[in-house]
């Protein structure tokens, strides 16, 4: 049967940020935090020996390294995230993972309590 395989691994983190582009006095100009959920998708053909698109242990290790950079940090202080919108977070995470996970196809970042998300499709 023809088709394409997609695998997904998720992780979460807690972080604070602020938005300097909002008008003075806007709630989002103050430091505030969110619980974020991230979904990373990989695609490809399974390895002939393992039967896997990617080893989930390797995927977990790569995601843990990114999570460590984000979890309980002030996102505005992370290089490349001066404006930590969902869009910029998704693109930044994809960039951090691309070398270790060349099969990456998308990164989705969610703020579940707000019902908001952004998916970045890796070109």
Image (cartoon, grey):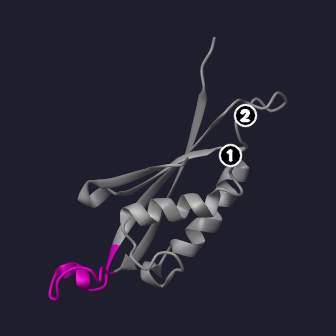
Could you tell whether 47 is left or right of 68 in the image?
right
Rendering coords of residue 86 (x, y %)? 37, 63
Residue 26 marker: none
Rendering coords of residue 22 (x, y %)? 21, 79
Rendering coords of residue 77 (x, y %)? 48, 85
Residue 52 marker: 2
Question: Residue lying furthest top in this view?
Answer: 1
Rendered-image quadrant of the N terminus: top right
Identified at 71% across, 56% down, the residue is: 100
Residue to which mark 1 is pinned: 56
SS under mark 2? loop
Identified at 30% across, 79% down, the residue is: 19
- Give above or below for 116 relative to 79: above
What secondary structure predominates along the stretch shown in magenta? loop
| Marks 2,1: beta carbons within 8 A | yes
**Of 6 and 56, the residue lying toward us:** 6
Could you tell whether 5 is left or right of 52 in the image?
left
Identified at 51% across, 80% down, the residue is: 78
- Give above or below for 5 relative to 81: above
The residue segment tinted magenta is 18-33
């Amino acid at each position: 049967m023809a088709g394409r395989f997609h695998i997904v691994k998720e992780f979460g983190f807690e972080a604070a940020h602020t938005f300097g582009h909002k008008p003075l006095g806007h709630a989002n100009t103050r430091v505030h935090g969110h619980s974020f959920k991230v979904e990373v998708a990989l695609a490809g053909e399974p390895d002939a020996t393992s039967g896997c698109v990617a080893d989930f242990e390797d995927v977990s290790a790569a995601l843990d390294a990114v999570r460590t950079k984000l979890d309980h940090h002030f996102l505005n202080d992370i290089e490349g995230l001066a404006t930590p919108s969902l869009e910029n977070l998704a693109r930044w995470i994809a960039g951090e993972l691309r070398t270790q996970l060349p099969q990456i196809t998308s990164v989705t970042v969610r703020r579940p309590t707000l019902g908001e998300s952004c998916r970045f499709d890796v070109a």
